[in-house]
C-alpha cells in the first residue's frame, strides 16, 4: 500500500475551496467598491466623496459607488465601515466631527483611530467667520472688542453641538479671552438664515456655505481660519493676519477602511486619490468649494487624525462641551 504524505492530503482537501481565497492585493480591485458617506447627499462630505470616487473609478477602471448613510452625527455610517470586511471593497469618508466624536461620545461603538485603516486626507476646508450686518464690526479686532465690552451678550450659531463650527468658535474664545453664547441649530441652513436676519451675531462655517451670502451683501465676511488666504475668498484676510497668531481651524474630508485592510490596498487607494486631486480640473473644483486638495499617504493621514483627536479633545474638555441628552 502506498502511503500518501499528509501535505498532499491537506492540499487535496483544500483544492475545492481555493476559489474562495482572498484576491491578492496586487489584483485589487476586481469588483465595484462601496464608499459609505455618513451624511446626506449635497453637503461638503458628499461632494468631496463623489469627486474622490470618480477619480478612483478613473484610476482603477471599476465602479465606485457612493452610499449615503446619515444618522447620529455620522456614527451610524462610520460604524458600518468599522464592521465591514477588511478587503478594500467597503471604504468610508469622514470629516472633522469624526475626531471630535472620540471625546464627545464616551460610549462610541468604535475608536476613531484604531478601528480603521486610514487611507488619505482628501482635502481641508478652513472655516470663515461672518457677522450679521447689524453688528458694527468690519474686522476681527472690532468683533473681539465688542465681545469683551459685552461678555456673554453676543451669540454665535453652529450646525450643532460639537460641530466644527462650534468647536472652532470655542477655540477662538479661548485664545482671545472672550465669551459668546452658543446657539446650536439642526444644520447650517437655519443657522445662516438667523444670521442674515440678525437673531444671531456671529457664525463660522465653510467658505462655500458663507461666501455666496457675503457677496450678496446679506452678511459680512470677517476672517478666514487658515494659514493662507483662500482662492475662493481672496479678499478675506486670515485670523493670523488679523492679529490672532496660530489660529487655524476648519473641517476636512478623509477616507478610511476597516482595521485590518491590507496595507497594499490602502496604499493603492491612497495613490489613486493623490493622483486624482492633483489633476488641474479637480483642484479648480476644490478651490471653488473653498477646499484645499491634499491627497496624502496612510501614515501622514494617521498622524494628522491623531493630532485632530487630541486638539479637539482639549477644546471639548476645557469648554466643558456636553451633548444634549
Image (cartoon, helix red, strand yellow):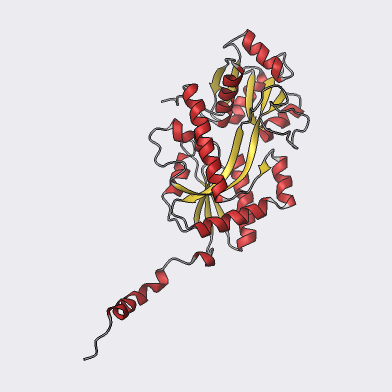
In the depicted structure, whether residue 200 falls above or below residue 186: above
Q: Is residue 82 left or right of residue 56?
A: left
Instruction: Residue 92 in the image: state x and y as whole percent.
Output: 52, 48
Q: Nearer the viewer, residue 292 or 200?
A: 292
Q: Is residue 82 left or right of residue 271?
A: left
Instruction: Residue 252 in the image: state x and y as whole percent.
Output: 60, 39
Farthest bottom residue in view: 1
Instruction: Residue 66 in the image: state x and y as whole percent.
Output: 56, 51
Tell me the quarter of the image containing the N terminus. Answer: bottom left
Farthest top residue in view: 149
Q: Is residue 91 left or right of residue 242?
A: left
Instruction: Residue 275 in the image: state x and y as whole percent.
Output: 66, 55
Q: Is residue 94 visible?
A: no
Q: Is residue 230 visible?
A: yes
> How many callouts does the rendering have?
0
Residue at x 73% of width, y 35% of height: 230
Tell me the quarter of the image containing the C terminus. Answer: top left
Q: Quadrant of residue 192?
A: top right
Farthest left residue in view: 1
In the depicted structure, whether residue 105 falls above or below residue 26: above
Q: Quadrant of residue 127?
A: top right
Residue at x 57% of width, y 56% of height: 269
In the depicted structure, whether residue 85 falls above or below residue 22: above
Q: Nearer the viewer, residue 60 or 301?
A: 301
Residue at x 58% of width, y 19% of height: 173
Amino acid at each position: 500500500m502506498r502511503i500518501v504524505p499528509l501535505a498532499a492530503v491537506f492540499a487535496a482537501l483544500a483544492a475545492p475551496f481555493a476559489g474562495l481565497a482572498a484576491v491578492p492585493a496586487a489584483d485589487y480591485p476586481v469588483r465595484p467598491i462601496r464608499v459609505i458617506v455618513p451624511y446626506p447627499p449635497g453637503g461638503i462630505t458628499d461632494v468631496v466623496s463623489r469627486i474622490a470616487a470618480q477619480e478612483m473609478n478613473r484610476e482603477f477602471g471599476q465602479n465606485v459607488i457612493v452610499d449615503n448613510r446619515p444618522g447620529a452625527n455620522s456614527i451610524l455610517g462610520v460604524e458600518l465601515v468599522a464592521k465591514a470586511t477588511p478587503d478594500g471593497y467597503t471604504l468610508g469618508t469622514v470629516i472633522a466631527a469624526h475626531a471630535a466624536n472620540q471625546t464627545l461620545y464616551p460610549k462610541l461603538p468604535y475608536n476613531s483611530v484604531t478601528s480603521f485603516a486610514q487611507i488619505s486626507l482628501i482635502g481641508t476646508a478652513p472655516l470663515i467667520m461672518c457677522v450679521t450686518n447689524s453688528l458694527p464690526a468690519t474686522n476681527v479686532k472690532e468683533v473681539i472688542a465688542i465681545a469683551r465690552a459685552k461678555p456673554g451678550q453676543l451669540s454665535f450659531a453652529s450646525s450643532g453641538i460639537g460641530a466644527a463650527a462650534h468647536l472652532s468658535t470655542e477655540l477662538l474664545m479661548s485664545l482671545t479671552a472672550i465669551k459668546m453664547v452658543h446657539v446650536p441649530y439642526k444644520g447650517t441652513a437655519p443657522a445662516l438664515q438667523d444670521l442674515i436676519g440678525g437673531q444671531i451675531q456671529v457664525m463660522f462655517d465653510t467658505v462655500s456655505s458663507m461666501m455666496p451670502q457675503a457677496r450678496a451683501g446679506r452678511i459680512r465676511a470677517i476672517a478666514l481660519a487658515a494659514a493662507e488666504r483662500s482662492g475662493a475668498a481672496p479678499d478675506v484676510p486670515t485670523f493670523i493676519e488679523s492679529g490672532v497668531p496660530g489660529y487655524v481651524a476648519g473641517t476636512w474630508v478623509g477616507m478610511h477602511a476597516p482595521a485590518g485592510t491590507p496595507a497594499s490596498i490602502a496604499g493603492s487607494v491612497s495613490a489613486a486619490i493623490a493622483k486624482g486631486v492633483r489633476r488641474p480640473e479637480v483642484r479648480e473644483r476644490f478651490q471653488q468649494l473653498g477646499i484645499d486638495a491634499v491627497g496624502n499617504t496612510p501614515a501622514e493621514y494617521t498622524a494628522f487624525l491623531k493630532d485632530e483627536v487630541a486638539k479637539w479633545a482639549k477644546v471639548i474638555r476645557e469648554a466643558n462641551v456636553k451633548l444634549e441628552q
